[in-house]
Image (cartoon, rainbow, N blue to C red):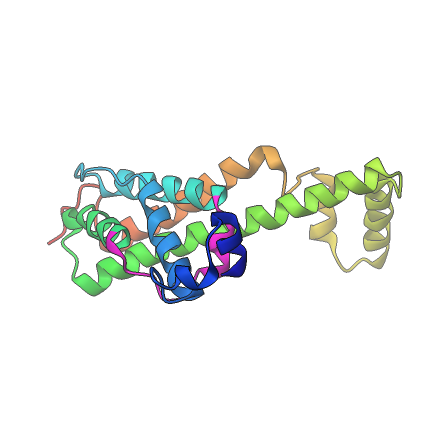
Amino acid sequence: MRRIAQVLRAGTMSLYWHIAGKEQLIDLMRDMLMAEIAVPEPSGDWQADLRAIAVSLREMLSRHRWLMDFTGGRPPFGPTTLLFMESSLATLDALHLDWETKLRVLESVTTYVQGAVLREAQEARVHEAEREIETRGHGDLTQAMKSWRARLNDTGLFPRFVQFLDAGIDPDAAETVDARFEFGLDCLLDGIARRFGSRTGDRD
């Protein structure tokens, strides 16, 4: 609170005329950022609508990764968050689900997105560390990987993993991050559709 007061060039105690403390301030910030998530008008194609919400949520979280420190906790339920919930629930009307199931569907999608963004943030830190190692000349990562592969192969315990290494697939490649996100989202939405109905919600 003192640091915020310094930035605003105000007295620390004067902030408490407007907010109760740090927790309320964070709730207000979280609620405000929910306005950055684009929720489409219900089109009748709930999968397309949920996909749009998931993509927009990912973009918002990627811009404000500090929010990841507060995922899994109680949502702020401010006006912007409530509007997001209202609009998101409306996209599932075509599925004719009970309220608890609707909530579980939305929870599954948002949890997937949060997990994906967390992984992407971790991957970015790893890539940065690798670039720093190579820049400073502290080691040849390619040669180190070849030596590691040879040691694994010599044990005879990891034939499938060695084949995976030989395929030259980088599971954390920056250029495939969007495709990996889309793949997981496709699997999730297809699973929901298989369990609860068709794309257009013909199940009563």
Apparent side of residue 91 relative to residue 133 in the rendered image (left or right) = left
- The single residue placed furthest to the top in the displayed view is 175
Locate residue 24: give its quadrant. Answer: bottom left
Which residue occupies 19% across, 38% down?
41
Q: Nearer the viewer, residue 111 or 44?
A: 111
Q: In this orientation, does residue 115 appear?
A: no
Q: Position of residue 12 (x, y in %)?
A: 47, 61
Q: Nearer the viewer, residue 14 or 130?
A: 14
Examine the rendered structure and indicate whether residue 131 appears above or below residue 150: above
Q: Position of residue 27 (x, y in %)?
A: 37, 59
**Magenta run includes residue 62:** no
The segment highlighted magenta reads: 64-79
Q: How many marks?
A: 0
Q: Nearer the viewer, residue 130 or 81?
A: 81
Apparent side of residue 96 relative to residue 173 in the rendered image (left or right) = left
**Magenta run includes residue 72:** yes
Q: Position of residue 8 (x, y in %)?
A: 47, 48
Apparent side of residue 142 relative to residue 177 in the rendered image (left or right) = right
Q: Where's the C terminus, which quadrant?
A: bottom left
Q: Nearer the viewer, residue 165 or 10?
A: 10
